[in-house]
Amino acid sequence: MTAIAMPEPDAHVIARRVEIVKALQAIVPGEGVIHEETQMRPYETDALTAYCQMPLIVVLPETVEQVSAILKYCHENDVKVVPRGAGTSLSGGALPLADGVLMSMMKFNQVLDIDFDNRAVVVQPGVTNLGITRAVEHEGFYYAPDPSSQIACSIGGNIAENSGGVHCLKYGLTTNNVLGLEMVLMTGEVIRLGGKHLDSEGYDLLGLMTGSEGLLGVVTEVTVRILQKPETARALLIGFPSSEDGGRCVADIIGAGIIPGGMEMMDKLAIDAAEDFANAGYPRDVDALLIVELDGPEAEVDHLLERVVEIANANNASHLRTSETEEERLTFWAGRKAAFPAVGRISPDYLCMDGTIPRRELPKVLAGMRDLSEKHGLRVANVFHAGDGNLHPLILYDANKPGELDAAEAFGADILRLCVEVGGVLTGEHGVGIEKRDLMTDMFSEDDLKQQQRVKCAFDEKHLLNPGKVFPVLHRCAELGKMHVHKGQLPFPDIPRF
Amino acid sequence: MDAILKPRDAKDTCEAVKWAAAEETPLEVLGSGSKKALGRPVQSAHVLDMSDVSGVEVYEPAELVLTVRAGTPLAEVEKLVSDSGQELSFEPMDYGPLLGAETGKGTIGGVLATNLSGPRRIKAGAARDHILGLEAVSGRGEIFNSGGRVVKNVTGYDLPRALCGSWGTLAVATTLTLKVNPKPEMATTFVLEGLGDEAAINVLCQAMGSSAEVSGAAHLPDGHDGGPARTLLRLEGFKASVDYRFKALQSLLSPFGAAGRIDGEPSDALWQSVRDVTVFAGKTTPVWRVSIAPTAGPAFVSTLRESTDVDVYYDWSGGLVWLSCQDGNVHDAEIRAAVSAVGGGHATLIRADSSIRTSVAVFEPQDAALAALTRRIKSQFDPHGILSPGRMVAGN
């Protein structure tokens, strides 16, 4: 199945495969160029496993010079390139192209500089998210953004997707924690942005690059901000008879001026699945479960725990436990962190969605999802980052039953449309990729999307870097650049001007 | 014919830009004009005055979100959120005192266009970290939306952030959605006196590297405002927590002497003066704003002082150096050489006559590849070069 169509492969490029392999081997000697089908197989998909495509060739450069030479060659020869980090994208961001070179950045795996005084770490893009924390934790530091895949996902991929995680409510997303980048444009030009200092001397290209899904440039070096670990962290497990009560409790906590380190909610189906799987001690007789983690100096955490308990009780909490030990805190989290595999156990397959909504719309969206669940005849389990309104509905289906994947995808699209309808967005942290590409027109007008694509033209005029992702319709840059102007009178002449 | 075009809404703005594009005549994009004396002067017969595109569209304190039209005065926005116990936590500075202009002026559009921030930049970020979405008119005369009304959003390129700090050269923002935050219950300042620059920056970096959650880290050198050197650390939050962290800093920094404590209004006034560079106010000496790695601050200043007489102070844990050239010359070559000698960063000329701001690079020059990319981005938003041309870089 492929409901989402990729651009028609260019037969001329495929016909030149042998020649392209030779050219790449001249740039990356040894085993850095993979062209045997069996060896390329591991690269045919990322974490959006419903979609597979064998790449034309796989190349694993080791130096910036090689990356630059590969891109320059591909640019001159009109060959498409798909950059790939650890391949953990849930939106198909690293899905290969039949006529494209897949460039894996995983040999860029060195920590280059640890600077505790300036709280900055310089790493190569293939270093894992958790690898950064591992490199600095002996001095009590950590890297704050913590996507669930942090043990595997690369920091280069985090830049591409502007990854979040449980703690971004308080500590920000990738974009708030990156200080500098080195990247290579499709032409092979090397560009350095930022460093250990703050802000930019010109346009904020660091901000633009973060979350650009590998369409603008290939990141070859990253400088991130590290933080000292909070002195202490404690968690509350709060159960509610209804998701409305839980939603109100979340709003009241934020309204009281409290920004928790993490605030996660789960619905009944997710609670049961997680408890069966992880034995975290979750209550079974509640409809919504909230985990609130408070971190910081001990005096502050104690003070805020009291406040949150008051707020929870005022919102009909039917179950309330506070972690008394670090072990207990981790147990509270064990269920939530295992929610995806736990759901994987109660269903042969699931689709993980990722929309964001204004917090106050939570009850409405949950009710809407229940209706959609009936309409599509599929179950949905919900886990979400309640503090920032980022939902992860897990749609349960069986790929072996004819039509179920199509039904699951249609269900997912309906959920995301619902998110947009209530003032939210299509994706909070997983990226558009191919998964939500064709829904972009539900959120943006044609002019909105054209202006975004013009930005792409400034970086990659030939549309060779990761094409087919993010934008539903690819416009040629020459066409996007055309302007139709009509000379006329000064506008709004009824207003006095001087 | 010189015209001031004063649109009332996005549609008017769009018409005005379309007209200018058709005429291929540049527009100087202004909010209240409070930052006209900053950046390169724009050569333009016509002004696009956005001050009537004003007003709050939606403010939802419980969602921590605010949507306002770009011409809304900053003071009005700050008052509105303050009345609900919230704030713009990036602490936008007021250039009025430094530039010898009125204080409390400026629009929210101008805040974004210049990516303002303040001492809390090191903890809470700058304007760029608080803009969630916008509606804007490109130099093509097309209205576009980007971003959204929620914090977590990766749907499409982050154009709101890219427009932050673009000084009105890419598009004219008409509506902005901002993230707001709860105001801290209280603030206090931890003060050490008599430290030299190196020891002081060491103190600031140690404090920033601790778990004390410092939200301001500045050093005012000896004689700088008439008194002894003062090294300042700001703590904000719930009282119990602030007191606790104050003690933690005392114990961490005990080798550097006994700490004083400033609370309440005097503490707020002190940080406002650090934010607004009031110590260089009321003069006409050239003033530069230099962003470098925090620990590079003292070496940067001592390198520079080998050739140039400068008065300085440090914010952002040493990473932001405000400097005033005492002999009245701009010394751009010496300053930029010193920035590069300590590992790089950028120096921006903030206060100087418009003739100087025309002839000297106000913003840090970029290398060839980055400058070319910048030009391509500009032309993709504004192909005829009609939006505040030359505001950042000559001929662009």
Image (spheres, rainbow, N blue to C red):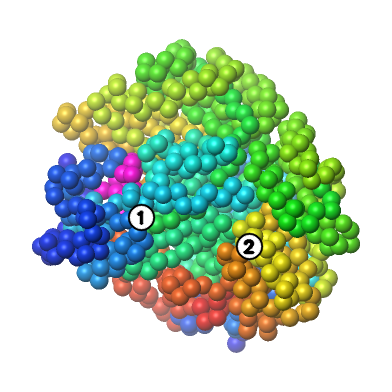
Name the subunit of mark 2: B
Q: Report the residue that reaches farthest toward the bottom.
A: B1
The image quadrant that residue A212 belongs to is: bottom left
| Residue B235 visible to the viewer | yes
The structure residue drawn at horizontal position 40% and vertical position 36%, both measured from the top left corner, is A151
Q: Give the range drawn in magenta.
A: A83-95
Q: Which amino acid does label 2 sit on?
A: Ser
Q: What residue type is labelled 1?
A: Gly
CB atoms of marks 2 and 1 within 8 Å: no
Task: Give neighbour class at mark 2: few <14, some 14-19, many 20+ (Cα, 10 Å).
Answer: many
What is the quadrant of the N terminus of chain B in the image? bottom right
Give the percent coordinates (x, y) of residue A22.
16, 63
Question: What residue is disc 2 on?
Answer: B291
Q: Which mark is residue A487?
A: none
The structure residue drawn at horizontal position 89% and vertical position 62%, both measured from the top left corner, is B226
Q: How many marks?
A: 2
